[in-house]
Image (cartoon, rainbow, N blue to C red):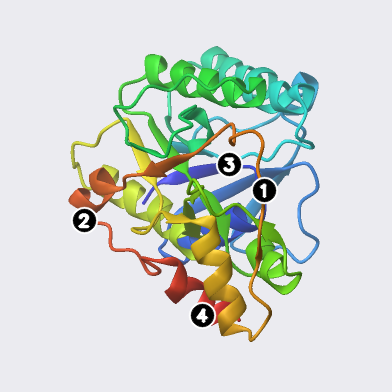
Amino acid sequence: MANILIVGCGSIGLQLAEELSAKGHRVTGLKRTPPTDALSNINFFAADIALKKQLKDLPTDFDVVYFIVSPDGRNPDSYQAVYEQGLNNLLNIFKLAHVNPQWILVSSTSVYGQTQGEWVDESSITEPENITSRYIRQAEQQLSLLNSQNIVVRFSGIYGPGREYLIRMAQQVSAVQQQPPYYTNRIHQADCVGVLVYLLEQSLAGVDLEQYYVASDNDPAPLWEVVSWLASQMQCEPPTVKLIEDLPQLNKRCNNQRLKALGYEFKYPDYKLGYAELI
């Protein structure tokens, strides 16, 4: 069994911690404000990773580090604080202790800057224009160069309980782009946890893994199609056609073939299965 540190224990991090602990792993969660009803089988270390002094007593005897952070806001400073300053603070702590755990970085498909509805996979160009996405890409590259065993998982749009933005959009009879198609890519929160557990298990079993994985379901679909389907399922009025002057800055379709070829089976392979349960 592995000794695991989960940096960032939001909803995904906490679910991951519980599942890994149930499988017998020793789990520590690093979070600025640990939950007051923390489970007895999960250790917590309270710290803000952007503040170096708060990490001085962090244990370093970990085999694996999951990096699952959420910036405070959508501004560049918030992304720099966690993906640059915070990551470097943690790396320095381990460097001083002369230990080199395996890292599993939760990234985002926002690192792809494609705008024409192209298919993208792990070999596609990653040149995002958005500075916040560039901070994520910088963290990817830093960990990839540090150790060939480190893994980057690029999640697409996460949905699930508490993440119901498209349901609200359908309920509000929103104006939605119909032409040209604006593709959406998504992954259910349960599959986020499933993928992270699966990759760890494959690594511990000695399977030769790639450094990058796109984690998105099997069905990239136009936003118009998804919102229209949701509206029909909830017996709401269909969306209205949004007249557009400028094309979206990001528009791509995510190919998950590498992850599926490894053997991962999605619990929610398409949006209809996932959202039907939510509504």
Sequence-wise, the earlier of marks 3 and 2 is 3
- Indicate which label's residue lies in the foreground, 1 or 3: 1
Q: In the figure, is residue 244 to the left or right of 113?
A: right
In front: 167, or 153?
167
- The image quadrant that residue 89 belongs to is top right
Query: In whole angstroms, how far apart are the C-alphas of marks 1 and 3?
Result: 37 Å
CA gap, disc 3 and disc 2:
23 Å
Q: Earlier in the sequence, mark 2 or mark 1?
A: 1
Residue matched to label 4? 276
Q: Tag 1 or tag 4, which sits nearer the N-term?
A: 1
Q: What element carries label 3?
A: loop
- Asked whether residue 63 is in view, the answer is no
Give the number of the mark in front: 2 or 1: 1
Return the residue nearer the eye: 137 or 152: 137
Q: Where is residue 178 in the image (x, y as percent from the top left)?
A: 55, 54
Residue highlighted by disc 3: 68
Give the residue drawn at x 47%, y 16%: 142
Question: Callout 1: helix, strand or loop?
Answer: loop
- Binning the other alpha carbons within 10 Å of mark 4 as few (below 14), some (14 to 19) or many (20 upward) gives few
Residue on which disc 1 sits: 243
Do tag 2 and tag 4 residues touch (Cβ < 8 Å)?
no
Closer to us: mark 4 or mark 1? Answer: 1
Q: Which residue is drawn at 60% across and 52% down?
A: 177
Let me know if residue 126 appears in the view.
yes
Which-is-in-front pick, marks 3 and 4? 4
Quick one: label 3, few (<14), some, or many (20+) residues within 10 Å?
A: some
- Marks 2 & 1, CB-CB < 8 Å contact: no
What residue is pinned by disc 2?
263
Question: Along the polypeptide, which appears first: circle 1 or circle 3?
Answer: 3
180 up-or-down from 38: above or below: above
- Distance Cα–Cα, label 2 vs label 4: 25 Å
